[in-house]
Image (cartoon, coloured by chain):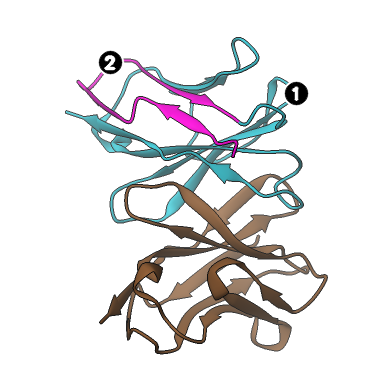
Chain colours: A cyan, B brown
Amino acid sequence: EPEVTQTPSHQVTQMGQEVILRCVPISNHLYFYWYRQILGQKVEFLVSFYNNEISEKSEIFDDQFSVERPDGSNFTLKIRSTKLEDSAMYFCASSGGLAVTGELFFGEGSRLTVL
Amino acid sequence: AQSVTQLGSHVSVSEGALVLLRCNYSSSVPPYLFWYVQYPNQGLQLLLKYTSAATLVKGINGFEAEFKKSETSFHLTKPSAHMSDAAEYFCAVIKDNNNDMRFGAGTRLTVKP
Protein backbone atom coordinates (compact mmCIF):
# COMPACT_ATOMS: atom_id res chain seq x y z
CA GLU A 1 0.00 0.00 0.00
CA PRO A 2 1.45 3.40 -0.92
CA GLU A 3 2.48 5.52 2.00
CA VAL A 4 3.99 8.86 2.91
CA THR A 5 7.52 8.53 4.23
CA GLN A 6 9.40 11.06 6.32
CA THR A 7 13.04 11.46 7.24
CA PRO A 8 14.62 11.80 9.67
CA SER A 9 12.42 10.17 12.29
CA HIS A 10 14.17 12.19 14.97
CA GLN A 11 16.53 15.14 14.75
CA VAL A 12 18.27 16.98 17.55
CA THR A 13 19.68 20.40 16.75
CA GLN A 14 21.07 23.45 18.45
CA MET A 15 19.07 26.65 18.63
CA GLY A 16 19.80 28.86 15.64
CA GLN A 17 20.69 26.00 13.31
CA GLU A 18 18.91 25.31 10.04
CA VAL A 19 16.87 22.13 9.77
CA ILE A 20 15.42 20.42 6.72
CA LEU A 21 12.73 17.80 7.15
CA ARG A 22 12.07 15.59 4.18
CA CYS A 23 8.95 13.89 2.95
CA VAL A 24 8.17 11.61 0.05
CA PRO A 25 4.45 11.90 -0.67
CA ILE A 26 2.40 9.25 -2.41
CA SER A 27 3.49 9.32 -6.02
CA ASN A 28 0.30 10.36 -7.83
CA HIS A 29 -0.83 12.88 -5.23
CA LEU A 30 -1.04 16.55 -6.09
CA TYR A 31 -1.50 18.30 -2.74
CA PHE A 32 1.07 18.34 0.02
CA TYR A 33 0.88 19.53 3.61
CA TRP A 34 2.94 20.07 6.72
CA TYR A 35 1.47 19.93 10.20
CA ARG A 36 3.14 20.06 13.57
CA GLN A 37 2.25 18.75 17.01
CA ILE A 38 3.96 20.20 20.04
CA LEU A 39 4.15 17.58 22.78
CA GLY A 40 0.80 17.24 24.49
CA GLN A 41 -0.92 19.76 22.24
CA LYS A 42 -3.15 19.67 19.19
CA VAL A 43 -2.08 19.01 15.62
CA GLU A 44 -1.59 22.39 13.93
CA PHE A 45 -1.76 23.20 10.24
CA LEU A 46 1.36 24.85 8.84
CA VAL A 47 1.09 24.94 5.08
CA SER A 48 -0.40 23.36 1.99
CA PHE A 49 1.31 23.19 -1.39
CA TYR A 50 -0.09 22.64 -4.87
CA ASN A 51 1.23 23.14 -8.37
CA ASN A 52 4.65 24.15 -7.06
CA GLU A 53 3.43 26.92 -4.86
CA ILE A 54 1.97 27.49 -1.41
CA SER A 55 -1.83 27.41 -1.53
CA GLU A 56 -2.57 28.06 2.15
CA LYS A 57 -0.46 28.83 5.20
CA SER A 58 -1.20 29.45 8.84
CA GLU A 59 -0.03 32.20 11.12
CA ILE A 60 2.59 29.81 12.47
CA PHE A 61 4.28 29.57 9.08
CA ASP A 62 6.37 32.72 9.27
CA ASP A 63 9.50 33.79 7.42
CA GLN A 64 11.57 31.20 9.27
CA PHE A 65 9.75 28.43 7.44
CA SER A 66 9.88 27.49 3.79
CA VAL A 67 8.75 24.55 1.70
CA GLU A 68 10.06 23.17 -1.52
CA ARG A 69 9.49 20.35 -3.95
CA PRO A 70 12.98 20.22 -5.40
CA ASP A 71 12.87 17.18 -7.61
CA GLY A 72 9.30 16.09 -8.22
CA SER A 73 9.32 13.46 -5.50
CA ASN A 74 10.56 15.04 -2.27
CA PHE A 75 8.66 17.71 -0.35
CA THR A 76 10.79 19.51 2.20
CA LEU A 77 10.18 21.80 5.15
CA LYS A 78 13.05 24.08 6.08
CA ILE A 79 13.35 25.97 9.32
CA ARG A 80 15.99 28.64 8.81
CA SER A 81 17.03 29.39 12.37
CA THR A 82 15.47 27.05 14.88
CA LYS A 83 14.06 28.22 18.19
CA LEU A 84 13.34 26.20 21.30
CA GLU A 85 9.62 26.48 20.61
CA ASP A 86 10.08 24.75 17.25
CA SER A 87 10.53 21.47 19.12
CA ALA A 88 7.63 19.35 17.95
CA MET A 89 6.57 16.40 15.85
CA TYR A 90 6.25 17.47 12.23
CA PHE A 91 3.84 15.54 10.03
CA CYS A 92 3.83 15.56 6.26
CA ALA A 93 0.64 14.64 4.42
CA SER A 94 -0.48 14.32 0.83
CA SER A 95 -3.79 13.98 -0.97
CA GLY A 96 -4.92 13.22 -4.47
CA GLY A 97 -7.39 16.09 -4.45
CA LEU A 98 -8.50 18.99 -2.35
CA ALA A 99 -8.56 18.18 1.36
CA VAL A 100 -12.31 18.68 1.37
CA THR A 101 -12.87 15.84 -1.06
CA GLY A 102 -9.80 13.70 -0.72
CA GLU A 103 -8.33 11.88 2.20
CA LEU A 104 -5.10 13.18 3.64
CA PHE A 105 -2.47 10.49 4.06
CA PHE A 106 -0.03 11.25 6.87
CA GLY A 107 3.53 10.14 7.38
CA GLU A 108 4.73 8.87 10.72
CA GLY A 109 6.30 12.18 11.61
CA SER A 110 9.71 13.69 12.24
CA ARG A 111 10.44 14.59 15.82
CA LEU A 112 12.51 17.76 16.10
CA THR A 113 14.23 18.58 19.35
CA VAL A 114 15.85 22.00 19.62
CA LEU A 115 18.35 22.42 22.46
CA ALA B 1 -14.11 30.61 10.70
CA GLN B 2 -14.64 26.92 11.21
CA SER B 3 -13.21 25.21 14.28
CA VAL B 4 -13.82 22.11 16.36
CA THR B 5 -13.87 21.53 20.09
CA GLN B 6 -13.33 18.12 21.61
CA LEU B 7 -14.85 17.69 25.04
CA GLY B 8 -12.71 15.56 27.29
CA SER B 9 -8.99 15.21 26.77
CA HIS B 10 -9.07 11.69 28.19
CA VAL B 11 -11.77 9.03 28.06
CA SER B 12 -11.45 5.65 29.73
CA VAL B 13 -13.79 2.73 29.02
CA SER B 14 -13.83 -0.96 29.78
CA GLU B 15 -13.34 -3.48 27.01
CA GLY B 16 -16.73 -4.19 25.44
CA ALA B 17 -18.27 -0.92 26.60
CA LEU B 18 -19.62 1.86 24.42
CA VAL B 19 -17.12 4.41 23.17
CA LEU B 20 -18.34 8.00 22.85
CA LEU B 21 -15.90 10.75 21.89
CA ARG B 22 -17.39 14.21 21.62
CA CYS B 23 -16.77 16.83 18.98
CA ASN B 24 -18.61 20.08 18.44
CA TYR B 25 -18.03 22.37 15.54
CA SER B 26 -18.53 26.03 14.91
CA SER B 27 -19.36 26.96 11.37
CA SER B 28 -21.47 29.45 9.54
CA VAL B 29 -21.80 27.12 6.54
CA PRO B 30 -22.16 23.35 6.27
CA PRO B 31 -18.77 22.02 7.33
CA TYR B 32 -16.64 19.13 6.17
CA LEU B 33 -15.79 17.11 9.26
CA PHE B 34 -13.33 14.31 9.89
CA TRP B 35 -12.19 11.94 12.60
CA TYR B 36 -8.58 10.80 12.62
CA VAL B 37 -6.88 8.27 14.88
CA GLN B 38 -3.24 8.33 15.99
CA TYR B 39 -1.75 5.17 17.40
CA PRO B 40 1.41 5.52 19.49
CA ASN B 41 4.43 6.57 17.45
CA GLN B 42 2.45 6.65 14.24
CA GLY B 43 0.94 9.25 11.95
CA LEU B 44 -2.71 10.16 11.65
CA GLN B 45 -5.11 7.77 9.97
CA LEU B 46 -8.52 8.74 8.65
CA LEU B 47 -11.39 6.98 10.44
CA LEU B 48 -14.29 8.64 8.64
CA LYS B 49 -15.44 11.87 7.07
CA TYR B 50 -18.67 13.83 6.67
CA THR B 51 -19.16 15.69 3.43
CA SER B 52 -22.96 16.21 3.57
CA ALA B 53 -23.90 13.03 1.70
CA ALA B 54 -25.36 11.28 4.79
CA THR B 55 -25.66 12.34 8.40
CA LEU B 56 -24.60 8.94 9.78
CA VAL B 57 -21.14 8.11 8.60
CA LYS B 58 -19.57 4.70 9.02
CA GLY B 59 -15.82 4.39 9.21
CA ILE B 60 -13.15 1.80 9.71
CA ASN B 61 -12.73 -0.46 12.73
CA GLY B 62 -16.44 -0.32 13.61
CA PHE B 63 -16.52 3.41 14.33
CA GLU B 64 -19.27 5.72 13.21
CA ALA B 65 -20.23 9.35 13.69
CA GLU B 66 -23.47 11.24 13.34
CA PHE B 67 -23.66 14.79 12.08
CA LYS B 68 -26.29 16.70 14.08
CA LYS B 69 -26.81 20.19 12.80
CA SER B 70 -29.18 21.13 15.62
CA GLU B 71 -26.48 20.30 18.17
CA THR B 72 -23.50 21.33 15.98
CA SER B 73 -22.00 18.00 16.90
CA PHE B 74 -20.15 15.17 15.21
CA HIS B 75 -19.58 12.67 18.00
CA LEU B 76 -17.65 9.46 17.35
CA THR B 77 -19.05 6.19 18.65
CA LYS B 78 -18.30 2.50 18.70
CA PRO B 79 -20.70 0.02 20.31
CA SER B 80 -18.05 -2.20 21.86
CA ALA B 81 -14.51 -1.08 22.70
CA HIS B 82 -11.55 -3.29 21.93
CA MET B 83 -8.12 -3.07 23.52
CA SER B 84 -6.68 -2.16 20.13
CA ASP B 85 -8.83 0.99 20.06
CA ALA B 86 -6.56 2.65 22.62
CA ALA B 87 -5.19 5.69 20.81
CA GLU B 88 -5.52 9.45 20.39
CA TYR B 89 -8.55 10.59 18.40
CA PHE B 90 -8.77 13.90 16.60
CA CYS B 91 -11.79 15.66 15.20
CA ALA B 92 -11.01 17.97 12.29
CA VAL B 93 -12.74 20.46 10.04
CA ILE B 94 -11.83 21.96 6.71
CA LYS B 95 -11.54 25.68 7.17
CA ASP B 96 -13.52 27.72 4.70
CA ASN B 97 -13.59 25.03 2.00
CA ASN B 98 -9.92 25.24 1.27
CA ASN B 99 -6.97 23.04 2.10
CA ASP B 100 -6.55 24.24 5.66
CA MET B 101 -7.63 21.36 7.89
CA ARG B 102 -7.99 22.35 11.55
CA PHE B 103 -7.79 19.74 14.28
CA GLY B 104 -9.29 19.60 17.72
CA ALA B 105 -7.10 19.16 20.76
CA GLY B 106 -7.54 15.40 20.71
CA THR B 107 -9.03 12.83 23.06
CA ARG B 108 -6.93 10.02 24.42
CA LEU B 109 -8.94 6.80 24.67
CA THR B 110 -7.86 4.21 27.21
CA VAL B 111 -9.45 0.76 27.17
CA LYS B 112 -9.33 -1.23 30.39
CA PRO B 113 -9.45 -5.03 30.37
Q: Residue A95 lies in what quarter of the image?
A: top right
The residue most toward the top is A71
Q: Quadrant of the C terminus of chain B?
A: bottom left
What kind of residue is marked 2? Gln
10 Å crowding of disc 2: few (<14), some (14-19), many (20+): few
In the rendered image, residue B62, in percent from the top left (x then y), is placed at 56, 75
Q: Which residue is mark 2?
A: A17
Q: Residue A25 lies in what quarter of the image?
A: top right
B19 or A64: which is nearer to us? Answer: B19
Taking A87 as reference, is B99 left or right? right
Tell whether position B101 is magenta: no
Taking B3 as reference, is A28 left or right? right
Element on which disc 1 rests:
loop
What kind of residue is marked 1? Asn
Residue drawn at (53%, 34%) of the image: A4
**Rendered view: A12 above or below A90:** above
- Please give the range of residues in magenta: A1-25
In the rendered image, residue A57, in percent from the top left (x then y), is placed at 59, 36
Element on which disc 2 rests:
loop
Mark 1 or 2 closer to N-term? Answer: 2
Q: Which residue is mark 1?
A: A51
Residue drawn at (77%, 69%) of the image: B30
What's the CA distance linking mark 1 and mark 2? 29 Å
- For marks 1 and 2, give the one nearer the viewer: 1
In the rendered image, residue A66, in percent from the top left (x then y), is placed at 51, 21
Q: Quadrant of the N terminus of chain B?
A: bottom right
10 Å crowding of disc 1: few (<14), some (14-19), many (20+): few
**Rendered view: B76 above or below A10:** below
Tell whether position A22 is magenta: yes
Taking B22 as reference, is B53 left or right? right
Q: Looking at the picture, do discs 1 and 2 lie on one chain?
A: yes
